[in-house]
């Protein structure tokens, strides 16, 4: 007589689903400070299993699938004023464009897929246009609003530049303000730089790859 093994219960995650250049790294750093295992980008199955908090690619693109794969997850949507976000995302996309479009290498396929999906159609001409980039931002924002309609308790929307944003984060996570040793978000990745996360040394930091290698199937 045989019995079926029970299916492992998937633990809910905290998924940061703001677009690039909305302070995802600053929020990830804050989450490390609050004691969460955190991955900024996740390109292996192990990263998804190990991390309690995941940001950036592929979660800003795949949040609906991840919601079903990791029941009882919480979602943090980061906003940023257009006059600040547009020049920052434009500079980032200009730097990434060649490697996003290459067929003979460049960035890993998960990252390529997410950027080409959210910023579709991703062309050199389009990323120079503020109107195009703003439409991409608004399309992503509207999709999140539609998806979480009636589930507002599962979604926190914040702009980290606003004074009360950190307090709202603690409330959303049900973290006692008095027990937190941090009092706000640290501004990093200034001046178009995007590699501050790589320099962070913290035992709770979860690597996005396995020594540079990715998995074809993430979750």
Image: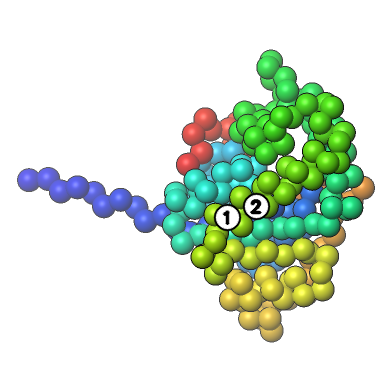
**Could you tell me which residue is drawn at 60 percent across and 47 percent down?**
59
Instruction: Report x, y in % for residue 187.
Output: 85, 59
Q: Residue furthest bottom?
A: 178
Q: Are marks 1 and 2 in contact (CB under 8 Å)?
A: yes
Q: CA distance from mark 1 to mark 2?
A: 6 Å
In this picture the colour scheme is rainbow
Instruction: Report x, y in % for residue 42.
Output: 60, 43
Which residue, given by chain and number where applicable, does mark 1 sit on? 146
Report helix, strand or loop for mark 1. Answer: helix
Instruction: Report x, y in % for residue 181.
Output: 73, 76
Q: Quadrant location of residue 61?
A: top right
**Front-most of residues 142 and 198:** 142
Q: Residue furthest left?
A: 1
Q: Quadrant location of residue 170?
A: bottom right
Which residue, given by chain and number where applicable, does mark 2 sit on? 142
Q: Residue furthest right?
A: 191
Residue 143 visible in this rendered orientation of the protein: yes
**Could you tell me which residue is drawn at 69 percent across and 84 percent down?**
178
Give the total of numbered labels.
Answer: 2
Relative to residue 171, is residue 116 depicted above or below?
Answer: above
Report helix, strand or loop for mark 2. Answer: helix
Where the N terminus falls, by quadrant? top left
């Amino acid at each position: 007589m045989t019995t079926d093994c029970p299916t492992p219960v998937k633990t809910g995650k905290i998924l940061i689903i703001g677009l690039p250049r909305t302070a995802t790294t600053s929020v990830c750093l804050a989450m490390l400070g609050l004691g969460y295992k955190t991955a900024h980008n996740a390109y292996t199955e192990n990263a998804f299993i190990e991390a309690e908090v995941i940001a950036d690619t592929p979660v800003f693109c795949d949040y609906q699938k991840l919601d079903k794969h990791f029941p009882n997850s919480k979602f943090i949507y980061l906003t940023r004023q257009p006059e600040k976000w547009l020049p920052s995302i434009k500079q980032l996309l200009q730097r990434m464009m060649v490697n996003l479009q290459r067929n003979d290498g460049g960035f890993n396929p998960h990252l390529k897929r997410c950027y080409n999906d959210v910023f579709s159609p991703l062309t050199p001409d389009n990323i120079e246009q503020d109107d195009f980039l703003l439409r991409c931002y608004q399309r992503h924002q509207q999709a999140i609003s539609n998806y979480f309609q009636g589930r507002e308790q599962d979604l926190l929307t914040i702009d980290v530049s606003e004074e009360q944003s950190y307090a709202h984060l603690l409330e959303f996570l049900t973290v006692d303000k008095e027990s937190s040793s941090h009092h706000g978000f640290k501004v990093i990745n200034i001046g178009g730089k995007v590699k501050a996360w790589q320099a962070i040394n913290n035992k709770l930091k979860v690597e996005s790859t396995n020594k540079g290698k990715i998995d074809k199937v993430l979750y």
